[in-house]
Image (spheres, grey):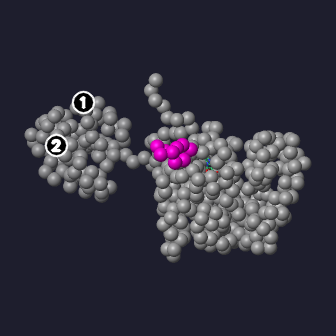
Amino acid sequence: MPITAIKGMTDIFSPEVELWQTIEARARELFESFGYREIRTPIVEKTELFARSIGEDTDIVQKEMYTFPDRKGTMLTLRPEATASIVRAIMQHRLYNIPTMGKFFAIGPMFRYERPQKGRYRQFHQIDAEVIGSKEPIVDAEVMYWAMLFLEKIGIGSTELHINSLGCEECRMPYKRSLVDYLKKYEASFCRDCQRRINTNPLRVFDCKIEKCKEIVKEAPRILEFLCGECQKHFDSVRFFLDQVGCSYTVDHHLVRGLDYYNRTAFEIIASGLGAQNAVGGGGRYDGLFKELGGPDIPAVGFALGVERLMIVLGENLPGHEIKKPDIYLIALGDDAQKTCFLIAQNLRKKSVYVEMGYELKSLKSQMRRADKFGASYVVILGENELVKGVAVLRNMTTKEQFELSLDGIEKTLAEKIKKE
Ligand code: AMP
């Protein structure tokens, strides 16, 4: 039996990979306009980093992490999300001391052991952004605006931004009490996980995907009714700035996000056409995470978009997506001609001309067929007769015109011709 890829992990190749490249390029362009700098962190981290940041009682940490001991028995985990690693890197290298370094982005694979289905994979990719060092609501609004603008720029217009506030320690305490009182009334009807969550981490009950649990929490108390003065002011300002840039949103009272580190603003972006896995992205503020991980008190806000889900929503409709075709296809007829063609090909590539050549010495007819399949603009044919005469035949594949070119300086002649067109 040939070896296949691991379940839930996919190979990405042409022509789809060109769509990925376009999406990534658009993200990089937009990040640049907003002053974000790229950060690349390792794919593997100490397990403790994720357990402490994401939260021991979250689905991710409880059920979904790829965790294993290394040869010395240190527990390692394939990153299930990017924020924790980025925060760790910022702390480790004291990047918070560099005034021009407040905004970070990362693009890369994440790993979660989930049940694979449409839009849900075990290796998936995120476009991630983190802004550190400001408590201001204007930053939350700008971060959401980036995400909505990006979606619009890549041609995903029909999305909904859902927002909520998770308050701070101060307002969450009375809210949790009221939530637990409500949940306790239905304790027996909840699934086992939720029964445990009521006592350990009641907000996580909102993450449950089981219908019966989802039904009960619909009527649960709303955190927005418990916000303290400061959190209320923050939330109102976020809404003001979103309104100001014409970013429409829905306040979603039950949006808590599946990770423990969020406070105040939480948001999710929902797209149609994705079925059950309808969130293309989500994020929020995490003012306490740096301190929680043993660092200084640095407020921050961030988000992640799932690239596979963007791809599903886009289908083939990404504007400006095009697979490059060769400028020149070189056909050699005979051993000596092939040697000359090999050299011409490399010299042209040095001049940034896209060249393909027939590596097998086949008939002219079969090589022409191959050149056609590639969609080459020009074909250069070099046979033994041409070689003796010191020329090659250049054929324009659109007009079908052909004429002889001197082999002397042929790379320069061809490169100039291609550049002019
Ligand atoms: P999260 O970190 O769970 O908030 O996820 C942020 C975004 O990543 C989601 O909105 C999805 O678009 C994407 N995502 C999360 N988990 C998966 C997965 N298992 N497969 C594909 N995309 C995912």
Can residue 84 be seen in this snapshot? yes
Q: In the rendered image, which quarter contains the C terminus? A: bottom left
Q: In x, y percent, where is residue 280?
A: 63, 51
Q: In x, y percent, where is residue 322?
A: 45, 49
* Residue sitting at the far top: 1
Q: Residue at x 46, y 29 (%)?
A: 3
Q: Which residues are magenta?
A: 67-75
Q: In x, y percent, where is residue 44?
A: 50, 50
Q: CA distance from mark 1 to mark 2?
A: 16 Å
Q: Residue at x 24, y 29 (%)?
A: 363
Label 1 crowd (10 A; few <14 / some 14-19 / many >=20) = some
- Find out if the beta carbon at label 2 lies less than 8 Å from the nearest ligand 1 atom: no
66 in the magenta segment: no
Q: Which residue is mark 2?
A: 340
Tell me: 382 left or right of 206.
left
Q: Amino acid at mark 1?
A: Lys
Q: Which residue is mark 1?
A: 362
Which element is circle 1 on?
Answer: loop
Which element is circle 2 on?
Answer: helix
Q: Nearer the viewer, residue 299 or 143?
A: 299
Q: Nearer the viewer, residue 212 or 328?
A: 212
* Residue sitting at the far left: 388
Q: Residue at x 21, y 37 (%)?
A: 332
Q: On screen, 239 above or below 60?
A: below
